[in-house]
């Protein structure tokens, strides 16, 4: 790689680092509430800069293994950025109402909401919408947002981890992650414990997993970590 190309790569890496620092500052400084539209713009900017940093200065003529390593690095960077966004949304983000719940006056229990009846929250939202007691945008954010929150797991987990290509292990893994989130939200007083969240989060992730299994998508999604070659049958 020539000196000029190395300098351009260093500038791209520096731009990416500064962009991430500003993104983190905007989300966690407490001075701003970042709307959803701005969050999407931040994500688009990161994807563009990360793609430039990983692929724009790749040496020509790389072998297949080098290309796979580069793709793994690219997907891992996207996955880590997504996990940060998800954790921020679930535990810290004021735009999603993530503020600790007040403690009861007896200081023994926390004021948290727990729902263990499947689809009770979904029914309540739909009934409130039907009777005009709630705006449709709020229903969409809460129901469709729960479907979308863990949906990227349906791509990233099987693309980066071979065991997650098994539907049973994938569903169990995502459900376990969502259960950990629900328990953590109770302990940290940043949300409620709702079985509907578990159902919707898992359904959203599983829907994307099923789409990824389509042959023409799977062929490209699994390039970074290809399936292990099948062992030949013995004589």
Image: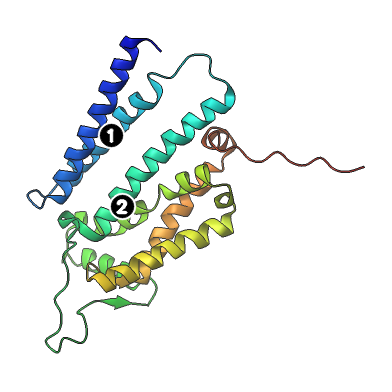
Extreme-front residue of the structure: 3
Please state the horizontal and vertical placement of residue 59, each as a whole percent of the image. Answer: 46, 16
Residue to which mark 1 is pinned:
46
Horizontally, is 195 left or right of 224 in the view? left
In the displayed structure, 22 sits above or below 1; it is below
x 52%, y 36%: residue: 221
| Disc sitting over residue 86 in the figure | 2
Extreme-bottom residue of the structure: 106
Horizontally, is 171 left or right of 96 in the view? right
Viewer-nearest residue: 36 or 85: 85
Q: Answer few, some or many: residues within 10 Å of disc 2's Cα (few below 14, many 20 plus, some between 14 and 19).
A: some
| Disc sitting over residue 134 in the figure | none
x 48%, y 14%: residue: 60
Extreme-left residue of the structure: 31
Please state the horizontal and vertical placement of residue 176, each as a whole percent of the image. Answer: 45, 65
Viewer-nearest residue: 104 or 65: 65
Q: Answer few, some or many: residues within 10 Å of disc 1's Cα (few below 14, many 20 plus, some between 14 and 19).
A: many
- First of labels 1, 2 by sequence position: 1
In which image quadrant can residue 76 be found?
Answer: top left
According to the image, what is the colour scheme of the structure?
rainbow
CB under 8 Å between callouts 1 and 2? Answer: no
């Amino acid at each position: 790689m020539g000196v000029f190309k190395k300098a351009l790569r260093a500038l791209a890496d520096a731009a990416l680092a500064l962009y991430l620092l500003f993104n983190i500052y905007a989300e966690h400084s407490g001075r701003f509430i970042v709307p959803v539209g701005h969050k999407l713009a931040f994500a688009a900017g990161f994807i563009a800069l990360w793609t430039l940093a990983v692929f724009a200065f790749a040496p020509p003529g790389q072998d297949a293994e080098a290309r796979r390593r580069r793709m793994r690095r690219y997907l891992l960077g996207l996955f880590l950025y997504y996990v940060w966004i998800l954790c921020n949304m679930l535990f810290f983000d004021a735009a999603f109402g993530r503020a600790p719940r007040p403690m009861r006056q007896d200081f023994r229990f926390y004021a948290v909401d727990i729902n263990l009846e499947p689809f009770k929250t979904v029914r309540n939202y739909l009934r409130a919408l039907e009777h005009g007691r709630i705006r449709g945008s709020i229903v969409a954010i809460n129901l469709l947002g729960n479907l979308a929150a863990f949906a990227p797991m349906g791509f990233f987990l099987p693309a980066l981890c071979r065991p997650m290509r098994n539907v049973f292990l994938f569903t169990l893994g995502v459900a376990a992650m969502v259960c950990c989130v629900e328990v953590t939200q109770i302990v940290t007083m940043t949300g409620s414990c709702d079985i509907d969240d578990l159902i919707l989060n898992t359904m959203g992730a599983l829907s994307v997993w099923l789409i990824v299994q389509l042959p023409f998508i799977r062929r490209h999604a699994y390039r970074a970590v290809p399936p292990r070659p099948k062992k030949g049958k013995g004589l």
